[in-house]
Image (cartoon, rainbow, N blue to C red):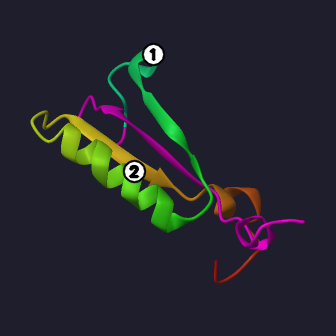
């Protein structure tokens, strides 16, 4: 039998980060060094991990972490997600 979490609709989010070449943009300085943290089933889970990673790198002003709404890329027609 499927658990409640498995039966809920997944709204996938990716947490990714690394050192930026310019703080005014979102271009990574070295793509080989990008930290692909993981994919999470909802925004809340992704936010918790994003916050932790951002706090770990607070001393490096060039390093940024982002939450990418994968569910919007996978299903751009869906509204309200």
**Residue 49 has which mark?**
2
Is 46 in the magenta? no
* Residue 37 horizontal/vertical position (percent): 47, 37
Q: Is residue 25 visible?
A: no
Residue at 90% from the left image edge and 66% from the top image edge: 1
Report, in whole angstroms, how far the alpha carbon at label 2 lies from the one at label 1: 21 Å
Comparing 48 with 1, the one in front is 1
Image quarter for residue 38? top right
Q: Quadrant of the C terminus?
A: bottom right
Residue at 42% from the left image edge and 26% from the top image edge: 34
As drawn, is 56 to the left or to the right of 7?
A: left
**Residue 32 has which mark?**
1
* Residue 22 horizontal/vertical position (percent): 23, 35
Q: Is residue 46 visible?
A: yes
For this orientation, the residue located farthest to the bottom is 80
For this orientation, the residue located farthest to the left is 59
- Residue range highlighted in magenta: 1-26
């Amino acid at each position: 039998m499927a658990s409640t979490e498995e039966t809920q609709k997944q709204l996938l989010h990716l947490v990714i980060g690394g050192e930026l070449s310019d703080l005014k943009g979102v271009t990574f300085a070295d793509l080989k060094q990008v930290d692909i943290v993981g994919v999470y089933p909802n925004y809340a889970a992704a936010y918790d991990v994003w916050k932790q990673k951002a706090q770990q790198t607070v001393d490096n002003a060039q390093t940024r972490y982002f939450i990418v709404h994968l569910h919007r890329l996978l299903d751009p027609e869906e509204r309200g997600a």
